[in-house]
Each structure stands twice: as C-alpha cells, then as structure tokens.
Image (cartoon, grey):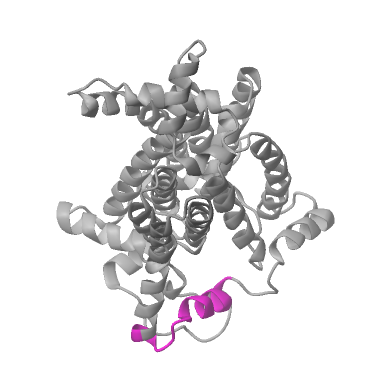
Amino acid sequence: MTAGTPTSASASTARSAEPELAEPVVAEPAVASVVTIDTDHAPEGSRARWFLTQSLRPVLVYLASRAGTVLVATAVASDTHKPVIDMLTPWDSSWYLQIARHGYVNHIPSGSGNPAQSDLGFFPLISLMTRFTHVVTGFDWSISGLVTTFVLGLLAAVAVWWMLRDLFGRAGADRGTALVFFSPGALVLSFIYSEAAIILFVACALIALRRRRWVLAGLCAAVATAADPIGSAAIVPCVVAAWVAIRTRGEWKALAAPLLAPLGIASFFIYLWAHTGSPIEYFRAQRAGWQGGSYFGGIPGAFNHLFHHFFADPDYAVKAVSVVVVVVLLVIFFKARPPGTWIGYVLGVLAIGAISPVIGVTPRLILRGFPLLGVVGAKLPPLWFEVVLGLSALCMATLAMMAMGGPLWTP
C-alpha cells in the first residue's frame, strides 16, 4: 500500500475513477483511492510485465501452500507404503476421474447410502477440464486431474490477490491471500476437487462486477455454477450488483450479469434431463447416496454428535468447531464493511451449507466462501495475523494427513 496521505485533488480524481457500485460499501475510501492511483499509474508500455511482477506475490504464496500438502502426502505415502499419487486423489477425486474417463451413468443404483452412490451426484466442470488436459497433454488421467486443479488453484490465487488489492493494497492482499490458501480446507486444492475452479471464477466475477463489466461477470459466474452446487452462490452478487446499478444509476445493462450467471447450472440440468430423463437427477443422486436426513440438519447434527460423543468422531468435531470459527470470522468480516457483492456471495455459500442434511459448515465450505477469509486476513493486526496463519496452516496439515489416511502421530 502506498505510504502517506493523498492530496485532496488526487483523492478526488481517484474517487471519480472508482466504480460507483463500490462507494456505499468501501470501509476505507482513502485506501481504495490510493490503490486506484497506484493501479492507474502502471508503467506505460510495460503493463503486462508490471501485472506479472505484481502477480508473483500470490504465486509464491500458492506454491508454498501446495508444497506443504505435498510434503504431508510424501510422509503419509512413506508411512503407508503407497504411491504419493494415491495420497493426492482421495475421496471424491475418483468420481471426477470416472466422469472424465467414461461420462455419466444414466441411472441411480438401487438402495440407499454407499450402494446407491453414483457419479450423477457431481457437477461436470472439473471432469470436463480434466478430459481436456488429458487430450491435450496425453498425461495419465490422475496426473491430468492434478495438473488441472493445480493450474486452476494457481490462477485462483492470482485472482484473489487482485480482488483484495482493490480494497486493501498489496500488504492486505498478501495477508488475505495467504489466509485463504493456508486455511484448513485448502488441503483439497491439492486433490482433484472443484474448489480451485469455484474460487477462480467467483473472484473474477467479483472483480468484473466492481468494474461494471456485466457480461464478463455473468459469464464467470456461469462457469462457477457448473463446478459445484456451492458455485450457484455466485448468482447472488450478480443480483446484488444489478439491483444497485439499476436503483442508483438506472443502468439496466447490469441485468446481463444475473441473467447469464445461472447458465452453467441450467446447462447441466438440461443435460441430465436429456441423459437420464429427469432434470433433477443430481438431487436424487445426492439424496440416495450421501444427503439422507432432514434439510437444515447438518449444523444441529454436528453439535448433537459432539455433545454425546465429544471428539470420538473427528468429522463431527471439525464441523462443530467450524461453526464457531465462522461466527468469529463473520464479526471481523462485517466490521470491515466489504462490498455488498462480497457479503452476498459469502452469505449465499453459508446458506447452502446450512440447508444440507449432513454438510453444515466445514473447512471446505469456509474455503469456498473465500472473501470471508480474505477480508479477515487483510484486516487482522500483524501479530494476530501471524498467530492465526500459523494455526491455520497447522490445521491444514493435520486435516491433510487425516484425509490421506495417515496417522496423526507415531509412538
């Protein structure tokens, strides 16, 4: 962040350059003004080099975070005598790879629970991108999936950094990006999962909305909605931005964003309709294989299990602790007065998690609500930030070890 206080003339110029949408919700207009001045004065004729030089900061943060999970994977692989590649493709990775290789099945197996699980319970974006990587590179399917998510995560780190830089300057963006990519849920960025794609395209959509690039924002949000049900929360900031633009400036072209945003999820459901005969086959597959129980039962269920069994089941304990963490994060988040589009997205993510019969709030859900982590990281005092980042990275390593099937410690 540029030191010193801008003159009244320069501050006025910067405010006029800021998108009007951001003005009612920017907590520190002076900060935003300084950042705008710095951005506008990028060296002429070398903007690309300047952009790449600035982007090196989040790239290094991302590489450091991934190096940590790879070290954990290597240690667990050595302990369990399994290939490292197996450590990096656990859980749902196999479903995404199955879709990439063979496409979707056309019916849900009979029964409930594990016997009824099928790839119809997963969105298509990561599998489509993995197939593209495989065709272009000729890599093995697992390697293709890992390369895809690694590149998406790298680009996501850059997008998050620039998104945060708009409001908090370079130092704030550094801290916020670090907290996002060293958060406990960030372990899945090293797997074949959808989080990297969601973060990338939602961050791009939020940047585009701030700059009133309505079509670009809608298209980015549409891609996010094809990645995962949580990605549909990207529709919320598009609606918020369009409502503000129309109400304050009569800018009806802002409707392009919310009209385009649902195209990803709508296209998937139309495909399912043609492929299986039902546009809601995804929901039926989830209910049959994973999401049994009453809606809104995830959060109460986690606390009920923790109350009766304490920490006997780490999964429920982590979910209960995550709820408490989210409450604390929300207090700091709202005190920072972030843009309304960011608030809309975060609340949309948390609402979708709360509706789930089993998910509730998890480290992965918090990761997908990344503006929450980014703002908190940018606003924490330096000493508190260092403590929180250290604990967060330790939790990420611990959860990664648990996810990969390794022991938490050896006697």
Q: Residue at x 34, y 85 (%)?
A: 274
Outermost residue on the top side: it is 4
- Which quadrant does the C terminus fall into? top right
Residue 5: x and y, percent? 52, 13
Q: Main secondary structure of the magenta part?
A: helix
Report the span colored magenta.
274-290
Residue 347: x and y, percent? 62, 53
Q: Is residue 162 magenta?
A: no
Whether residue 183 is visible, yes or no, is no
Quadrant housing residue 101: bottom left
Residue 308: x and y, percent? 83, 57
Quadrant housing residue 268: bottom left
Q: Is residue 248 left or right of residue 355?
A: left
Q: Residue at x 38, y 64 (%)?
A: 260
Whether residue 76 is visible, yes or no, is yes
Q: Residue at x 61, y 19 (%)?
A: 382
In the displayed structure, 273 sits above or below 29; it is below
Q: Is residue 51 left or right of residue 380?
A: left
Q: Residue at x 38, y 21 (%)?
A: 38
Q: Nearer the viewer, residue 17 or 365?
A: 17
Outermost residue on the bottom side: it is 277
